[in-house]
Amino acid sequence: MSAPTVAMRDAFGEALLALAPDFPAMVVLDADVSTSTRTAAFGKRHPNRFFNVGVAEANMVDIAAGMATCGLRPVVSTFALFLTLKGADQVRNIVCYNKLPVILAGHYAGLSDSYDGASHQSILDIAIMRAMPNLTVVVPADGIELLQALTAALRHDGPTYIRICRNPTPVLFAGESPLEIGKIRKLNDGNDLTIAVCGVPTSMAIEAADRLAQRGVSVDLLEVSTIKPIDAESLVLSARKTGRVLTVEEHTIHGGLGSAIAEVLSQRAPARMGMIGIEDKFTESGAYDALLRKYGICVERIESEALRLLTPER
Amino acid sequence: MLQRLAQEFRITVLDILHEKGTGHWGGAASAAELFVALYFDVMNIRPEEPKWPDRDRLVVSKGHASCMLYTVLAHRGYFPIEELKSFRQIDSRLQGHPCMLKTPGVEMSTGALGHGASVALGMALAARLLGKNYWTYVLLGDGDLNEGQTWEAIMAAAKFKTERLVALIDYNKVQLDGPSDQIMPMDPLPEKLRAFNWNVAPVVYDGHNAVAVLESFDWVRNQRQWPVAVIYRTHKGRGVSFMEDNAHWHGAPIDDETYAKARQELLQTLETLS
């Protein structure tokens, strides 16, 4: 039996339309990828609230910042790689420095722009965005969390980065309690090992935890949707209980979720840690599933890394 | 009166930069008349209510002119003149480059070049959506014009035909490393802007003649084709003969001997303005 799937970008496009009446100050900006990011439908319905600035990410971020100083609530939307690299100076020096309520929607994140190859694959956006003071960084795990993250960001008096996958992924949280910014969602209570995951690999971690349970390993499974500000208390509590922490992310292990958690635990609750993510290398073209697997983001790897962490240290 | 005020502010800025041993003289002196005209004549503002939603806005994209901006804001009543002494010092509201969260009257934090035109475009587009009639001005320097982002904004502002958006170009033609004609030539600037579908003032105004500067704003007010750009021929370090058009005085600390000579020259000119 396979769970129903929804692409986060489709959920994003629908969320913009759904939220438009409740947030009249919301405007949407895109950089010539509105059919890809699904902002085009918003543009069609609300042409006066939609601004396609062409392929000019830096300009787009600063236009949004200027609008935000006047009371508008801009949502800036383009591919995560270009937003966080070509717009990095603008995000830091204008949006974050001035605490402006701009929402940065980073699409096609991780390896999800799979066939386009390394030039388009955004595997360092979390590292860059997380280094920005005043910025909230959210990585939803499904379309439902994406809508909730966007809604929370529109109510937040400051900037938010939201990481968005291109492809259909399992719907995980229908009917569950909503995503809370800054709070870890506990998916399973266990004692032997902590698995902390964000984004698309969440469904893999759930399956790995089931497999581990069958082997008699009880996993404390944490979904860390807010990378910043990170829920340090929940992490410390879990690490003190299990003493072993495995992190899983669709991102380089240099500066992402694993690093964020290591920063907390190394100072407050040192634990034996493992990190699953992309090594310090460029990725390549291919089918999404095949890419994730090749670069080590899959159920089997989570399971084997968990078992490795559980073997006594030599 | 505005001409005299600009010269007085040059002296204030020179005093501060000398005393603190840090800051940018060249670009500050270059924009004195423009700042004074905007804050003491042109702009519809309420210094006692800096965040008044209907105010006109100035984005100082050439943020290194901060000391002149602060001097003008203080004398216009945004904060105590006394506070100018804290320029660039620890715990001060007057950062090396403008910070909108710290200094009343600063519309946007700038310093890294290339941001101002985009931000101003956003403000002008917001006015359209919010049904407001305020004007948005952006002060651009030579360095700003080097930045690719400025041209992204220039393209986009023309696409959106952004009303009441005015680019003021402090065209002193000297940048940090030397004359712009050697570092990165911008000429023919008016033709470039026209080619990007901007409505450019038919004459290049003398940016150090307060009467000419006010005339330029008379021209601006009568325009209906958007966006609008005005180019002012200015001189970096204006007011001190041996500092004018000299890239060294972009941001070099001012020693005692230089300071004494420069101040005397500024004072002599001031006496001729009554």
Image (tube, coloured by chain):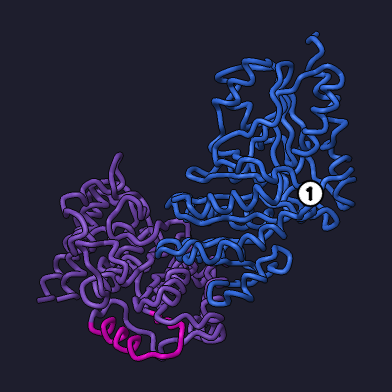
Q: In this view, does B183 lie to the left or right of A122?
A: left
B94 in the magenta segment: no
Q: Which chain is tinted blue?
A: A
Q: Is residue B274 above or below residue A166?
A: below
Q: Which chain is tinted purple?
A: B
Q: Is residue B178 visible?
A: no
Q: Is residue A144 above or below residue B57?
A: above
Residue at position x 40%, y 56% from top? B109
Q: Position of residue B19 (x, y in %)?
A: 23, 47
Foreground pick, B217 / A97: A97
Chain letter of mark 1 equals A
The quadrant where residue B220 appears = bottom left
Can you identify the residue that label 1 sits on? Answer: A169
Range of residues picked out in magenta? B211-231
The image quadrant where one finds the N terminus of chain A is top right
Q: Position of residue B199 (x, y in %)?
A: 46, 87
